[in-house]
Amino acid sequence: MYTLGVIQLSEVRVDKNQATEVLVKAIERATTKGYSWQSPFSKNIQTVLFGTHLTFRYILVTALLAKATNPKVNALCLQAGSQLDGAYDARSLCHNLLVPFERKYFNGGLGSSNEPFLNKPARAPELNPSNPVRRGNDQMLLDLLCTFLPQIQTQQEAFDALTDAIACCFIKFLEIRKSSTVQAAKIPTLTEMDLFLNDLLEQACGGETLVLTVGVLVKLHTMALAGKTKVEVHVVNQSGASSKEVSDIDVYLNNKMLYAFEAKDKLYKQEDVAHAVRKVIDSGFNRLIFVSGPRAMLQEASKQELIDAAALKGVYLTFMSHKKFIKFYLSQIPPTSIELFFSTLMELTREARMKDDTITYLQNTARKHGFIE
């Protein structure tokens, strides 16, 4: 029970076992042959689930599942501590039930996030048009959720909407599977790879194209190293609270840190570099490579000042432009790895759970260069 001034609100409970039964029934219904949209809000549901914002997908499906399980739930609520009547623990429902179900049945149809409610849009007490989100598409999706979710009032209406959402998840799964089977049309030359990667970086895609560029070259390079190697390419702009990453791209050899890369393709400050150095120190490592993209620019500090400051803390800090990075690593990767270039790129988009728009842009750029048909 929560005391809010003179008002006392009790948390609405969503029983996990009951929610599991609801979710199973929704999956059974959504996967029947000839399934047709059930909810009058199906177009709104499709807009969110086929949209580019991963966290809003989880917020929507969690809300519909909760409402379909307990009609007392307020679908706008994100936290049990919300002052709105009908508040419930959306985060626990999502992380403990929906995420494992997605992994087992939808194969990434929502985005394959392990802890989506740790991301910024889900950290507010409830959905509200004034919540801090980026302008444009993100604000549009937030406004849409705030508009149509309160109109879903009964348990049956919520269940109909939930089955439509599950059907969307399976459509997304088929799209993911189709994109993952795209085969390279040729083995590119090193010059062709250089031109392709620089062309790919013409668009930042929220920093994802630079992370892809660094990740693919580092991964191909490590194939020449003797021993057990692992390259971890992490989700761009993810809250660090949910993961153990050191930097954007972490490379291990025989279970020990070998390289740590930060990929920046926007304006950044001394505090951003200091934070990255601090994470390296906390991990027990002592080297960090900052790779800057076409749009990157360091503000209010000099790189040499940051290099010297890091050195005093025992960290060897290096800055490298994307052009120099590409040329250096292309000169280092083994010839046998080149044929894996495009398949490795696609693998990284899945591992780092990159946005659909990024994957489409990647494939269009690859098609333009004749890498795929």
Image (spheres, rainbow, N blue to C red):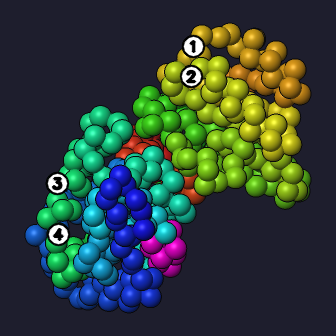
Check disc 1 and give the amino acid type: Gln
Query: For residue 152, which numbered disc appears in the image?
Result: 4
Helix, strand or loop: magenta stretch: helix
Dot 4, how many residues are within 10 Å of its Cα: few (below 14), some (14-19), or many (20+)? many
Q: Which residue is mark 3?
A: 147
Mark sitting earlier along the chain (1/2): 2
Disc 2 from disc 4: Cα separation: 43 Å
Residue 10 image-quadrant placement: bottom left
Q: Which residue is mark 1?
A: 299
Mark sitting earlier along the chain (3/4): 3
Q: Residue at x 71, y 22 (%)?
A: 319
Q: Residue at x 82, y 37 (%)?
A: 281
Mark sitting earlier along the chain (2/3): 3
Residue 106 horizontal/vertical position (percent):
43, 74
Disc 3 from disc 4: Cα separation: 10 Å
| 99 drawn magenta | yes
- Secondary element at tag 2: strand
Check disc 3 and give the amino acid type: Thr
Q: Quadrant of the N terminus?
A: bottom left
Q: Is residue 345 shown above or below 332?
A: below
- Whether the residues at callouts 1 and 2 have beta carbons within 8 Å, the answer is yes
Residue 346 in view: no
Q: In front: mark 2 or mark 4?
A: 4
